[in-house]
Image (cartoon, rainbow, N blue to C red):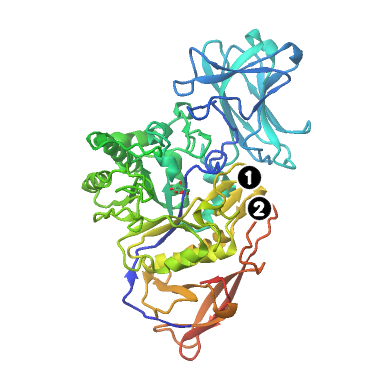
Amino acid sequence: VDITVESSGGNHTGGYHYGFLHEDINNSGDGGIYAELVRNRAFQYSDEFPVSLDGWRPINSANLSLNRLDEPLSDVLPVSVNVKATKKSGKRRVGLQNEGYWGMDVKKQKYTGSFWVRGAYKGYFTAELRSNFTEDVFGSVKVKSQAVANDWVEHEFELVPKKNAPSSNNTFAITFDPKGASGGSLDFNLISLFPPTYKNRKNGLRKDIAEALEELHPTILRFPGGNMLEGLTHSTYWNWKDSLGPLRTRPGFQGVWDYQQTHGLGLMEYLYWAEDMGLDIVIGIWAGLSLDGEVTPEADFQAVIDEGLEQIEFIRGSADSKWGKVRAELGHPEPFELHYVEIGNEDWLAGYPGGWTSYKEYRYPLFLKAVTEAYDDITVISSGATSDGDGFKIPAPGIGDYHPYRTPNALVDEFDRFDNDVGHIVGEVAATHPNGGTGWDGDLMPFPWWIGAVGESISLIGYERNADRIPGTFYAPVLRNMNKWQWAVTILQFAADTALTTRSTSWYVWELFARHPITTVLPATESFDPVFYVAGSNEDLGTLVWKGAAYNTTNGADVPVTVAFDGVKAGAQAELTVLTNNAEDPYAYNDPHTGVNIVDSTTTVLEANKDGAFEFELPELSVAV
Ligand code: AHR
């Protein structure tokens, strides 16, 4: 394959984005990147998920009961737990312990916690990190009681374990001496414990997961979903207003992925995530459609638009504006940057091609008008693509959103998908199903796998070739808690034990491509298959970049490649990085249980030949920059 790259005439992209979508699926928010260690910390509930003591156990035969007190901790957290000594408790301290999101990682580091108590108590509480199956206590702190008879009082503490626990099979426990409490009982609510967080944010992100995402060199974050944004019903979508302020004012909601959610990872936390990682954002705005198919009628739609406009004002309005002031009061007077707003999620605006026809197409045009009139520098994204088959024509200046979850072959077939189309983001993409397998109706692969990652690389190359109209690509979904999940294929896998956080095969491919940004895509020889590529320059770094992949080569042989950049002379040097799969099995994957990484990365320095071309060979199923 001989490729010549011209030195001018391409697409200036202004910075092409590699990023990811985050929604709370696979316990990737609660129990995932949101660093809270206590599960069911405030006994939140919904129609779908009744209130329970899930995650909690008594200590020393205490009786635990859930109550709705006349004076609850807050209107939105009406249920609390009463802890009462019983005969069996004898003279022992009593309390309750939480098993976390299927374990707790305990290390010699500073944990920060708090709990609210109601009831008179003279004495001290202990807050402890303990083994779940031996008598070991790894760290313990005494917290002087401030508790009084008729009010809720918050107790805060810091806890530094004396040693690392040998496993994550641990609990967090609070005890008190029933002799000092009237009637031997106390009411508790909102019991919280955080390890050190990413960039030390209060109520922040789990460090190891956030750092593994940061190491992907992302430049954009799409949130908050995904189906989570839409909700199952019109009263259970992800309402940004419920996600603001002190934790005791956040009600939690019935997520769409089979578990109750806390609202802990709220709008401000997402914005700090983007700010701390240096990411642009695509914010999803609820568009009057829930997953039960209900759509807000046109006559009532202004209220939906207003809520979206308020959300935008909250994010980027000045501290003098109504909602910018609320943000300022929450600690961020400076507006956040916001240039992409997406209307809904997968809204197939003229009717779902599969036959569900209740979606209504007035919604996007109304939003487009309202948002562009108020903010001429915001791109308004329609949450549907021109190829979704519903016939909806995305009105200018809007762009679409394409979500290909595909087999590797299908991703390769779609290499030229955007060569002749209007603008889109690729708001969710991943190889999910095996070639020749059962297709979408069958199971997803157990993890991202090598040939899938190579398939993704080829679609990424196709999108980046059209970077003047495709501002960015988002892996989705990104995170999977190995203890409870709904969607197998994610770029990172994790568990309570931070040692199990696993970068998938896709992680290595996306990392390599994102590490080498192109600011102008340059015209190059167009002869693709079995080598697919994009070339360009990076004006900020003063580099020339070629990204390519080999897929389905003749008889699986290595492919000789030459790349000649116009103006590059004999003897010039280039660095070539090639990713291959050392298991020599296209179905191999990085399994968190074994910890084995099957991706090999080899970097060599090439010298341009007498014609100024770089010569190298690409093995079958390899990805290179
Ligand atoms: O990423 C998982 C789901 O796939 C998202 O919630 C939805 O947008 C898509 O259909």
Q: Which residue: 56% across, 62% down?
A: 508
Q: In this view, does 464 lie to the left or right of 557?
A: left
Tell me the element at label 1.
Answer: loop
Disc 1 target residue: 495
Please state the total of marks drawn on the protein image. 2
Residue 539, given in percent of the width and then of the height, sits at 38, 70
Disc 2 target residue: 592
Image quadrant in which you'd find residue 27: top right
User: Cβ–Cβ below 8 Å for labels 1 and 2?
Assistant: yes
88 or 12: nearer the viewer: 88
Q: Which residue: 73% across, 37% down?
A: 162
Say above or below: 586 vs 61: below
For residue 366, say whether it is visible. yes
Residue 589, given in percent of the width and then of the height, sits at 63, 60
In the current view of this chain or complex, which residue is farthest to the front?
355
Q: Which residue: 42% across, 66% down?
A: 414
290 or 149: nearer the viewer: 290
Q: What residue type is labelled 1?
A: Ala
Pointer 1: residues within 10 angstroms few (<14), some, or many (20+)? many
